[in-house]
Amino acid sequence: MKTILNGKQMAITIDRLCHQLIENNLQFEQTVLIGLQPRGIYLSGRIHQTLLKLVPGARIDYGKLDITFYRDDFNQSKTLHVPNETNIDFSIENKKVVLIDDVLYTGRTIRSALDAMLDFGRPAAVELLTLIDRRFSRQLPIQPDYTGRTIDALISQKVRVLWNERDGKDEVVLID
Ligand SMILES: O=P(O)(O)OC[C@H]1O[C@H](OP(=O)(O)OP(=O)(O)O)[C@H](O)[C@@H]1O
Ligand SMILES: O=c1cc[nH]c(=O)[nH]1
């Protein structure tokens, strides 16, 4: 197992991503954040909290989206799908949506999210923020607008993002 980002590097990277979001969205009046269940919500939670500190007085709409029933392999899996909570208590109609997930690999999760999201309105635009972009692994034409770290990894390898609140520490690891 190899460390890609340690806790300190993760914090710096998340800070940088927040500044990039502020650069493009200023007060977030027309922009909402949506974290993807189950793993993206830790990153989106950190980003939301950091933005609230960096942009005093801003009201930044933030929700969590589960994509379980929108997956393109939903009918193929032999295991029972257990959905997570979707919690979006605002309309995304005509807003810019920033989708947030921890890892971008084939792009299929994001495709499902684009579908699932439409239950909450028709956004003016959608952007994608991901902590880790696994390059050269896409199966769909989906690319991030904000990236923490781009990495090359073998098909046999797996990237895991660990979070203090769930795993006891913040770290991004590459597993052989
Ligand atoms: O771009 P994709 O190929 O869709 O992969 C990215 C997704 O994979 C992980 O989720 P999850 O743990 O649910 O999937 P995994 O079991 O494939 O790692 C990760 O949190 C992303 O949501
Ligand atoms: O390496 C990978 C690929 C897909 N999803 C992950 O979380 N990690």
Image: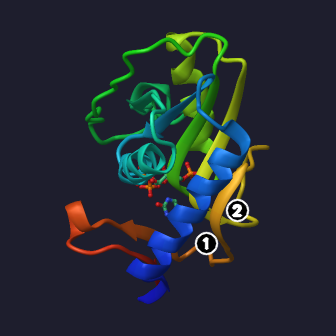
Residue 91 vs residue 80: left or right?
right
Quickly name the residue at label 1: 155
Q: Quadrant of the N terminus?
A: bottom left
The CA distance from mark 1 to mark 2 is 8 Å
Instruction: Check if mark 1's residue and mark 2's residue have beta carbons within 8 Å.
Output: yes
Q: Residues within 10 Å of mark 2 (few under 14, many from 20)?
A: some
Question: Which numbered disc covers residue 137?
Answer: 2
Q: Residue at x 55, y 76 (%)?
A: 156
Residue 8 vs residue 112: left or right?
left
For discs 1 and 2, the disc positioned in front in the rendered view: 2
Q: In the rendering, at what x and y percent does residue 59 appear?
A: 45, 28
Could you tell me if residue 104 is visible in this image?
no
Mark count: 2
Question: Nearest the camera: 6 or 15?
Answer: 15
Secondary structure, mark 2, is: loop
Q: In the rendering, at what x and y percent does residue 100 appear?
A: 53, 45
Q: Residues within 10 Å of mark 1 (few under 14, many from 20)?
A: few
